[in-house]
Image (cartoon, rainbow, N blue to C red):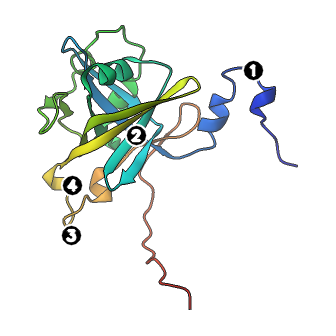
Amino acid sequence: MRTIFDPAEMEPGSFYPVLTASVLPRPIAWVSTLSADGVPNLAPYSFFTVSSAEPPVVQFTSVTRKDSLRNVEATGEFVVNLASEPMVEHVNASSAPYEPGTDEFAALGIATEPSERVRPKRVADSPIAIECRLRQVIEVGNSFVVMGDVLAVAVRPEAIADDGLPNFAALAPLSRLGRDEWGTPPPVRRIPRPGPPG
């Protein structure tokens, strides 16, 4: 017999840990933004994916209204920095409930570098940074899906493979699992896609 979790029969908020322990691994958008007053912000979001390839659009979800969301709405810009395995302690620390107006880069000693197309700075040690302009925010229940048009993808030279694309092994991406668990880069298999049947 399977255990059934029915959100209609559970207390508000109690279904979140069921979802996050079921939908995994989840890549992490380490989002850097600027407030309307120019204060940097950095926070990780594990509800993150690609929305569209043409045009290129990525999205992350803010569960409740947080500083990153308010900053994106105020300025229309954000950067998704890839959360890489060597940075796990900093990524985790940046999820703390800092007071609004706190610069997490400064508070945690995280190095920055200028972005190419937007005002929020990139995480200097992140192997990939996706610079975005806000496309739209969609409210879904107590959450907000933030969709951004990709203006540039900045990749550190050591993370580029021989074919000119980002190299998974060099990226060493972190992921979020359930509870307080984190995923590290798994083994990789290469399996060619099949052609048309028959």
Give the number of the disc on residue 159: 4
Camera-near label (4 vs 1) is: 1
Give the number of the disc on residue 11: 1
Pointers 3 and 2 in contact (C-beta within 8 Å): no
Vertical order, 152 against 164 (above or below):
above
User: Quick one: label 2 or label 1, which is nearer the N terminus?
Assistant: 1
Instruction: Identify the residue shown where x is 42% and y is 72%.
Output: 190
* Amino acid type, mark 3: Asp
> Does residue 153 appear to the left or right of 176 in the view shown?
left
* Amino acid type, mark 1: Glu
Residue under pointer 3: 163
**Badge 2 local density, few (<14 within 10 Å), some, or many (20+)?**
many
Q: Secondary structure at mark 3?
A: loop
Note whether residue 82 is visible.
no
Camera-near label (3 vs 2) is: 2
Note whether residue 116 is visible.
yes
User: Quick one: label 4 or label 1, which is nearer the N terminus?
Assistant: 1
